[in-house]
Structures are given as structure tokens and as C-alpha cells.
Amino acid sequence: MHTSADFERRQRFERLVSAFHPALYRYAAWLSRDPGIAEVVVQESLLRAWRSLDALREDEAAKQWLLTIVRRENARYFERKNVNMVDIDNLSAAEAATIAETGEPDLDDVREAIYGLDIEYREPLVLQVLMGYSTSEIAELLGIRQGAVLTRLHRARLKLKDIISADGCRIALRDNR
Amino acid sequence: MNCAEYREAIAADPSESFDGGAAHAAGCEECRKYRQEMQALDEHIARALALEVPALRMPELPPIETGGVKRGGKRASSGFRVSRFATPPFWAGLAAAAVVAAVLVAGIPQQERSTDDLVGEILAHMDHEESSRQVTSVPVATRTLDRVVSPQVADMDQDIGLVTYAMSCVINGRTVPHLVIQGNKGPVTLILLPEETIDASVPLSGENVHGVLLPVGNGSIAVIGQREDQLDEIGDIGRKLAESVEWNI
């Protein structure tokens, strides 16, 4: 039988998880580059978050707290399973599905280019563009200096620009606006 | 800001929220075009990153015992400090270490509830990170160590020991450095807690956990071994850390 405190705890947890689940899944998916692993990582992260929920003092900090848990859980998953890094030239069916599901070839090209970025470039890009984090917030989450974040973001975009241009991507960057 | 600086900055932050960006772009048509290019690229990046999300599957949530942390079948609640102190060899080991001797001089401080919570979190974390405590001679990569420690620690004794594990971990809702060094009698865990202020040292004890939580400036450091016979060395490591660590935040 659940107590009132237990009920309130569950309500709080479910509210937070519902709000941030899309962000958690996408973060995990872009970290692992595998939707199956992302689902496992998110599930493990939710369990860990549930056990540690009382450590979260303010719900305003929930997003960063949960993302940090996902980040740790992803690292733990790869340590535990001794999973090899994904080879971009030999994609599995699931991985290929991840980067080619939009039905828009131009967008798939960009997705594939992001998919091929090293994690050190891909992760801050995801945090900035998808999560809306500032460079100082990214620095805090990744435990690196803000200058390093700026360098990685700058290089990430230049790499994407080069890849997309070299592949003859149909996206007309200059004509977009 | 010149054109090269502007382009580097706008590629890192196409929203142009950095100082001096708008002023430079206002007077440079080429840079305005470059900005437009980067912003267009970012729109595509944002769309590409927005993967389709599967339906939320809420895991089965186990019941939680509030007010304490389960360890080895025993409940570690606000009273577990008393039971830890009841183990004579633990006290004997602590007494040998200068830094921990301070605890004896001061007596058992009246711990705030928050300190008990912190101790519970640390002990629970030691369960999660059991695999980190390996006997090895392979040092952690300098880059990893710098990434984990440098943002929060301004200075630390580099001769503290061979660091074989470094990870940023969440304890008490804060991301903190978790290190493992190789001691003379086995791995020793260091958890640096720059924002956790405690009044006095608190012994840490549990299954394969023998150590101490030390006040260091406005923060604290947990120094933890796996066996009681490591306590002398833990005291020594704790003293060195307390003298050398300076917090950066």
C-alpha cells in the first residue's frame, strides 16, 4: 500500500519524466547513435533517477540533473557491455534507420553528417541546438572549459558544412533566408 | 573584433549572443552573409537532431525507503552514525591519522540532517561504482583527469598517488569529481565535494567501505578504502588533500 508521501513522490517523478523524456531519449540516441541502446540507457537512467529523486532539491534543475544521469548511464552501458564504437561505414539496420527516417533526402544528409561527427563535437552540438543550452551550461555539464566548448562547436559546424558541401547536399545554405 | 574572430564566434554561437558580434556584423557585409549561412545551417541541424521519440515506457518503480539508504540489508538512516562508531577497530584506525584525530578531539559533532543525507548518497554511490575500485597500474588519461577535476579544483597535490579512475558523478544533485588512486594496501576512492559544507569529519563505514568525510574549506572530500587496515593511509591521504586542495567555485 502506498503512503501519501510515496504517492506524491511518484507524481513528482512522472511529471518530470513526462516533461523531459523526449530530450532524454534524443540525447541518449545521439550519444550512443543507436535507438535500441538509447531506450535501454533511458530506462536505466529513469530507474537511477527514481532512486535518487530526493537528491534533486529543485525541479528547475531537473533537466540538467536528468541529462547528467543519462550521460553517466550511457558511459556505464558502453563500459559494461564493452561495446565497440559505431562504424559509420558499416551501419546496422537500426542505426541506418536512425539517420534516414525523415523522408527528406536533404535532411537525411545533414543527419548522417551529424551522425559521423566524433562525440566530442556531436555532444556539445546536441546540447546547444537541441537542448538550448548556453556554452557555459554545456561547459558545466561536460566538465570542460567554456573556451573548449566554443572551439568544439565552431569546429563541429565547419565539419558539417564541409561534409555537406563535399557530398553535394541539396541544401542551399545561402538561399535559406 | 575582426572578421576571423567574428566568424569563429558565430560558428560556435549562431545566435550571436557574444559581445561585439552585432556591432561587427553591422559594418561587414561578408560577415553578415556568413552569419546567415551559419544560421541556415543551424536550422537544418536542429531539424536533423529532432529524432522521432518512441512512446514513454515508464519502468517499474521499486518502493523507496525514505529517510535512509539501504546497504547490505541494513537500513542506513540518520542513526547509522552511532552504529559505525561502535566498531572499535575503526576508531583505532582513525585515531592513528592526524586528520581524523581532529574528530576525536572535537568529539562527535551534532550532524545536520543534510550531512546524513550526503553520507547516505556517498555510500549508495560506492555501491554503484564498485567496478571503479580495481587494483591496476594503468593511470587514467591526463585529458580525462583534467576534464573531471580542473573545473572545480584550483589546486591539488599531484603526488597524492597514481590516479586510475576519474569520472564526473552526481552526488546530492551536483556533478562532482570521483577519483580512485592506488594506495599501498589497495584502491582508495576520493570524492571531491566543493559545494558540500560540513562542520566536522564524519566517518564512513559500510560493506567494503571504510573511510572519512573531511571538511575542506567550504567543501568536503570523502576518502574511502575497502578495508579497515587502510585507515592509516586514508588518514594520511586525507591530511594531504586537506592541505593542498583549493576549490575553484
Image (tube, coloured by chain):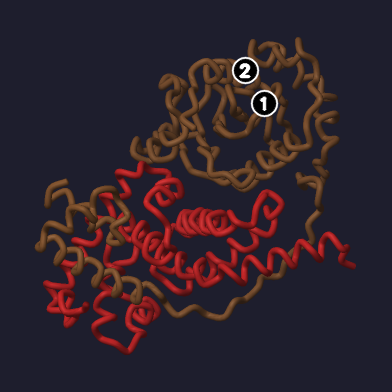
| Disc 2 packing (10 Å; few <14; some 14–19; many ≥20) | many
Residue displayed at 33% across by 58% down = A119
Residue displayed at 82% across by 44% down = B74
- The colour of chain B is brown
Query: Is residue A157 found left or right of B227 in the rendered image?
Result: left
Q: Give the chain letter for red.
A: A
Please name the residue that numbered disc 2 is placed on.
Answer: B235
From this view, report whether residue B10 is shown above or below residue B215: below
From this view, report whether residue A127 is shown above or below residue B208: below
Which of pointers 1 and 2 lies earlier in the amino acid sequence?
1
Q: What amino acid is at disc 1?
A: Val
Task: Measure the C-alpha gap from mark 1 to mark 2.
Answer: 8 Å
Q: Which image quadrant for residue B92?
A: top right
- The one of A139 and B58 positioned closer to us in this rendering: A139
Give how far across and how far down residue A143 sits, in percent. 42, 44
Please name the residue that numbered disc 1 is placed on.
Answer: B212
Q: Which image quadrant for residue B79?
A: top right
Q: Chain of mark 2?
A: B
- The one of B245 and B7 positioned closer to us in this rendering: B7
